[in-house]
Image: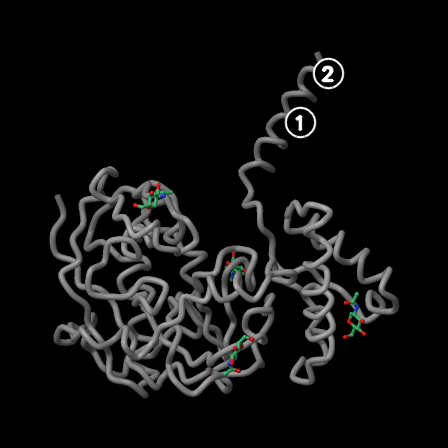
Amino acid sequence: MAGQALAAVLGIVLLLALLEPAAAAGLKFSEHDLRSEKAVRQLYERWCKHFQVARKQEEKVHRFANFNQTVHRVASRTIRVADEPLRLNGFADATWAELEACRCRMTPEGRRNLAPMPVKRRGGDANLPLPISIDWRNRTCQGHQCLGPTTGNMIVQLSQQELVDCDQTSRGCRGGLARNAFNYVTQNGIASWQNYPYSFLQRQNGTCLARTTPRTAVTMTGWSQLEPHNEYDLLTQVTYAPVVVAISVGENNTDLTSYAGGLYWGKCGTKNDHELLLVGYGFNYYILQNSWGLSWGDFGYLYLPKTHNCGILNRGATYPVIDDWD
Ligand SMILES: *[C@@H]1O[C@H](CO)[C@@H](O)[C@H](O)[C@H]1NC(C)=O
Ligand SMILES: *[C@@H]1O[C@H](CO)[C@@H](O)[C@H](O)[C@H]1NC(C)=O
Ligand SMILES: *[C@@H]1O[C@H](CO)[C@@H](O)[C@H](O)[C@H]1NC(C)=O
Ligand SMILES: *[C@@H]1O[C@H](CO)[C@@H](O)[C@H](O)[C@H]1NC(C)=O
């Protein structure tokens, strides 16, 4: 009897473990892991286990070179804040082509055909005091977590893949616009989670599968854009819902591709070339949801210091205007 109860409990624990995301936040390591090549190889095995990546023996040979390079680069970064641990993310053994593929970089051409709708500011009372911090990841909307792929969310995670595949005016991964692709707030209701297959933001063979996939009942009619250089306005909008912002990343920014949590003090670029979703802020940092998967950053999130914000205020934040609900 006790055995059966124990088995049932173990079964539930196992089930819960399986429901956990496969990926994990950064893997911590130390200088000690770099003392010899053997030690780095052991770290690589630990990394494979942590991120649950299966590598064939022959694949490991060339990937270890990438891993070795990443580990040494991360360990030698002078910008590292002294009390922050060294961490690796799930891209540590990635090839250059793989990093390029996940980049989903915005390009100047990507912006050309798009013009914003007039700003429809939510709220209107200027100069109300803002909350000291907001984190939409911890908020509940009508009894459910607001963010995330859960049926009944008040914030609906619409299909990013559908927009990458089907959007006619933007450019998908070669500079697609995130404002089309993140989370949108319903006016006063609940909408269902759209189950559109998601394949790492690559165009699916140039095919729009949406015509054959069940659709959510939402139409985006346009988007609003805030004025740049106004942090108060930006944070005010975040009190209503997450908004899309652009930061400057630059080409080949390995500081950012190898980011695995903690405050980001790495390199920034000069053009606002990468879009993310601003989901909150703390006293001295912004909290941003990236589109590079859960094994990047802090379970997919970036903590950007307000004093080192990669030009987040240089381009006005955008958010969608949604009209039609079936
Ligand atoms: C690992 O990186 C170190 C430092 O760059 C280098 O000296 C060493 O040759 C590399 N080992 C391998 C197997 O790539
Ligand atoms: C909010 O959620 C995030 C992610 O789950 C967590 O890291 C953070 O500590 C939470 N913040 C609070 C105040 O609970
Ligand atoms: C991709 O498109 C090509 C040409 O239309 C077709 O032959 C191929 O089967 C497609 N692949 C997939 C995975 O749909
Ligand atoms: C980025 O890296 C690629 C591949 O190594 C290289 O061809 C390109 O010139 C680099 N660009 C910059 C700006 O360093």
Q: Which mark is residue 107?
A: none
Q: What residue type is labelled 1?
A: Leu
Q: In this view, does 22 lie above or below 41?
A: above
- Horizontally, residue 210 falls left or right of residue 60, namely left
Q: Nearer the viewer, residue 42 or 155?
A: 42
Q: Earlier in the sequence, mark 1 or mark 2?
A: 2
| Among the 4 quarters of the image, the one containing residue 128 | bottom left
Task: Give the residue at x 45% y 56%.
Answer: 138
Q: Is residue 77 above or below residue 135?
A: below
Give x and y (percent) for residue 247: 41, 78
Give x and y (percent) for residue 79: 65, 84
In the rendered image, which quarter contains the C terminus?
Answer: top left
Give x and y (percent) for residue 162: 29, 51
Q: Name the residue under label 1.
A: 10
Name the outermost residue toward the top: 1
Q: Name the residue under label 2.
A: 3
Local crowd at mark 2 within 10 Å, few (<14), some, or many (≥20)? Answer: few
User: Can the viewer see residue 301?
Assistant: yes
Q: What residue type is labelled 2?
A: Gly
Task: Give the residue at x 20% y 42%.
Answer: 211
Task: Give the residue at x 43% y 53%.
Answer: 200
